[in-house]
Image: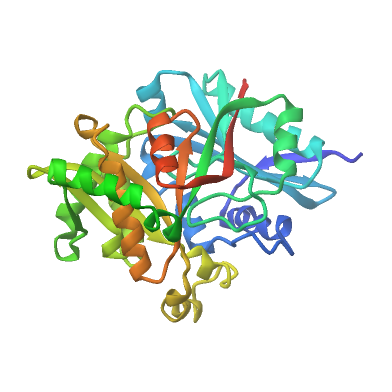
Amino acid sequence: MSEINVRTVQDKKDLLKFIKFQWTIYKGNKHWVPPLIMERKALLNKEKNPFFKTSQAEYFLAKRDGKLVGRIAAIKNDVHLKYHNDNTGFFGFFECINDQEVANALFDKAKEWNKQKGLNRMIGPANPSSNDEWGMLIEGYDDSPRLLMTYNPPYYNELCEKYGMKKAKDMFAWKIEYDKITSSEKLKRGKDIVQNRYKIKVRQLDMKNFNEDLEKFKYVYNKAWAPNWGFVPLSEEQIDAMAKDMKPLVEPSLVIFGEIDGKLAGAALVMQDYNQIFKHMNGRLFPFNFLKLYTMKKKISWARILTLGIIPEFQKKGLDTVLYWEIVERAFKLGIKQGEASWVLEDNDMMNRGLELMKAHPYKKYRIWEVNT
């Protein structure tokens, strides 16, 4: 077998090869959603993406006989290290032909880079962190990914396992259906009891006071999710950048806040599944594909709950039930009868029980892999 050469991405030309290698792997795959090339360039830009103000990364390309056969990123996240103190590095953006030798060469390179940074454990995939695309699909290959969720061939997990990686954590994507929820009188009574008992008020995002509401969302996000495995707090700059990207696509009625006695108690960020549109763009927004964001928007049939958080002092009161019900009703008014709550850690008992009560079911599973360096 000829030699596998793994080298670092050197310039913009290499970076474009790194991005577009996915088209080689997923050619003919009807479920894959091509990422927007301009969005990938921004995400991987170490000078402009605020993530890299507190993180380092190196991107690698693998070639054999002059042909590109794989890619990977090695990532050191200083915020994660400070928050968890676990001496852990990451790999991400992994794509590879179905060849164990190529995968081994890529994993070796990422592991070596992390080891040189003084890190003794590597987990992933993180693209580039748990606040972005996170995890490797291990169940649910017969469906396209929802917005900002990952998709990969089944053999990727075998490549990880044969390399010697082990499961660090699994995560679920839950399918929520309007008809199942609203047809349950028991659920409706339960929701009404909670709402009346605590006088919960639910309001939507106020676009005229976007920045003020953004501050409230930041507070809920970093407060409610802090105890979760793998959590890394978002910086002010990161949230601002995410908000700037999402603002043109956000549906105000699907971003909601729950208040009890005038106090902010929880919030949910729900996005229409624009992947159903991006799937037809082949990675290009311009010159004319951006028009599809408007002409095809009414055809979107899914939504994704990116985050639903309850501030700790208001947890275990059933507020999540009220927010889920609100989301389902509001989505239905937009013609959306199916939703995905993702991702949810396998051992997040409170979230998983709450979703079970809402008649949802886990229909996809993702895995974070780990290996010692």
Name of the residue lying farthest toward the front: 185
Give the colour scheme of this rendering.
rainbow
Quadrant in which the N terminus appears: top right
Say whether residue 165 is visible.
Answer: yes
Front-most of 131 and 177?
177
The location of residue 245, given as percent across then percent down, is 36, 60
In the displayed orientation, state which residue is furthest to the left.
262
| Residue shown at the point (65%, 49%) measured from the top left | 152
Residue 198: x %, y % from top left: 14, 41
Direction from residue 143 to residue 219 in the image, left or right? left
Taking depth in this image into account, of 166 and 307 the one nearest to the observer is 307
Residue 227 placement, left or right of 313: right
From the viewer's side, name the closer residue of 38 and 30. Answer: 30
**Where is residue 350, by image quadrant?**
top left
Residue drawn where x is 67% and y is 26% of the image:
165
Q: Is residue 59 visible?
A: no
Percent x, y of residue 186: 34, 47
Q: Residue at x 45, y 18 (%)?
A: 86
What is the quadrant of residue 83 in the picture? top left
